[in-house]
Amino acid sequence: METPVIIAEKAHELFLKHGIRSVTMDDIATEVHVSKKTIYKFFESKDALVENFIEKAIAENEESCKSFIRKSNDPITELFFTMVVVQKMYLDLNKPILNELEKNHHKAYLAMKEHKDGFIFQTIKTSIENGITKQLYQEDINPALMSRFFLESLLLISDTSIFPSTAYHTTTLSEEIFGHLISGIATSAGTNLINLYKNQHRFVLGPQTLTRPFWED
């Protein structure tokens, strides 16, 4: 593995474990067993490492969303799993990290904001529009308005200061909230499909379910 990749991966690991603010270039150098001079050869500042960290998180999130969309048979599972994948990103990049980006790492913060208001918003909106076309979602809803509502709801339940993991299991929370949100815009045909998935226990998520291609059964 190339030295800059090793440095970046260790920095990412430390940021997630300790928070961005608490991690110094000395900490990274110690963990990677290189000098700070070597780090600065590849990354001109801590900002550059933070930007790399966020760019990687965004790229992985986009690929995960696209992967589930490619495998999905209908807008119901497409929308549900898109929201689950996005929620996972925001849980990993917890609120303290996101707050730190906004305060001290402007470029990385803007990249996250652009990802949220661009890719994520458009992905949810397109899924809702597909659902309307296929008569699974109500035709009189406003896709842009509902997409914004879904996205902000997703961010809300990803906030562990509001929904602490000690009180709310992530899987149960996702299934309960996302399920109700999607049911709220569904037609009778959409509701029947949702009930089918629920009866088959196919909306129950977890590490195995997320990687299990149940739509190919």
Image (cartoon, grey):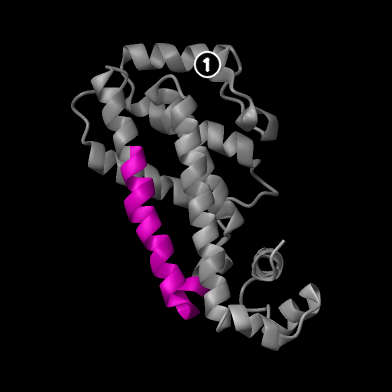
Residue 108 drawn in magenta: yes
Task: Say which of 214 and 38 sits in front.
Answer: 38
The region drawn magenta spans: 100-124
Which residue is labeled 1 in the image?
Answer: 197
Q: Would you say residue 78 is visible in this rendering?
A: yes
Task: Say which of 154 and 214 sits in front.
Answer: 214
In the displayed structure image, the side of residue 190 where residue 2 appears, left or right: right
- Residue beneath the point at 39% across and 54% down: 116
Q: Residue furthest front?
A: 2
Q: Would you say residue 158 is visible in this rendering?
A: no
Residue 125 on image: x %, y %: 30, 38
Above or below residue 217? Residue 43 is below
Residue 8 drawn in magenta: no
- Residue beneath the point at 26% across and 30% down: 129
- Residue beneath the point at 49% across and 72% down: 101
Q: Main secondary structure of the magenta part?
A: helix
Task: Say which of 2 and 92 sits in front.
Answer: 2
Quarter of the figure with the N terminus: bottom right
User: Which residue type carries mark 1?
Assistant: Tyr
